[in-house]
Amino acid sequence: MKSVLVTLIVLILLLNPGISFAQEELSQATVSALVKKTDHIANIKERIQERINLFFRFSNEAKADYQIELAEKRLAEVFYVVENKKGDFVEETTSRYSTYLGRLTETITKSKLSNKKEETLKMLDNHKSVLNEIVKYFEANSGFWLLVQHDINSIDIYKSQIEKI
């Protein structure tokens, strides 16, 4: 009786399709853990408020901290657009994301904020991992694939600039 029960449990575990599916979701879970959640794309009003908030950050460190937060939001928007199949917004969100990374990099390099170097490099590595998962949603060399790949390439460029400080 015990051997029948053990055999039955082993068969259920081996034949359960949910186990292999969970492995496929692992990368999705990893991406979800690295990306802030958002349920929309920032509209013009929100982006103007962000610019005003940035303007009133008087120290370069405070500006860099806020720009890191904004870069996280822009990545969340890219993820939201791809996850929810809102193809019309892929170009807008990927372009905006790389622009925000460029602004962050400029703030850090011009102000020589070496104390932000490691934090930013780690964030960029995480973002690159996320984008490497996102790019898999698209057929290689398609327009959307190229847009996401551009963000991945931009991260490499920005990382090399930050590493120099």
Image (cartoon, grey):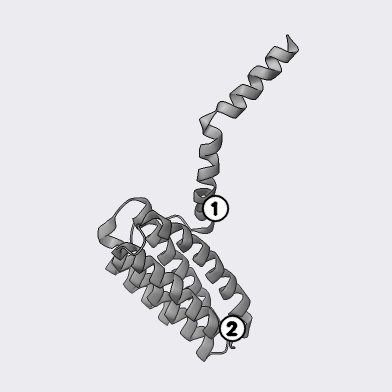
84 lies left or right of 88: right
Identify the amino acid type marked 2. Glu
Residue drawn at 56 percent across, 35 percent down: 19
- The residue carrying mark 1 is 30
Looking at this view, is 69 or 49 the one in front? Answer: 69
Cα separation, mark 2 vs mark 1, equals 26 Å
Q: Secondary structure at mark 2?
A: helix
Identify the amino acid type marked 1. Thr
Label 2 packing within 10 angstroms: few (<14), some (14-19), many (20+)? few
Residue drawn at 31 percent across, 63 percent down: 142
Residue pushed farthest top?
Answer: 1
The answer to whether residue 150 is visible is yes
- The picture places residue 42, in percent across and down from the top left corner, at 33, 64
Res 148 quadrant in image: bottom left
Residue drawn at 47 percent across, 62 percent down: 132
Quadrant for the C terminus, please.
bottom right
Looking at this view, is 82 or 153 the one in front? Answer: 153
Res 87 quadrant in image: bottom left
21 lies left or right of 100: right
Quick check: 26 above or below 105? above
- The residue carrying mark 2 is 163
13 lies left or right of 18: right
Res 116 quadrant in image: bottom right
Answer with mark 2 or mark 1, whichever residue precedes in sequence.
1
Looking at this view, is 85 or 115 the one in front? Answer: 85
- The picture places residue 130, in percent across and down from the top left corner, at 49, 60
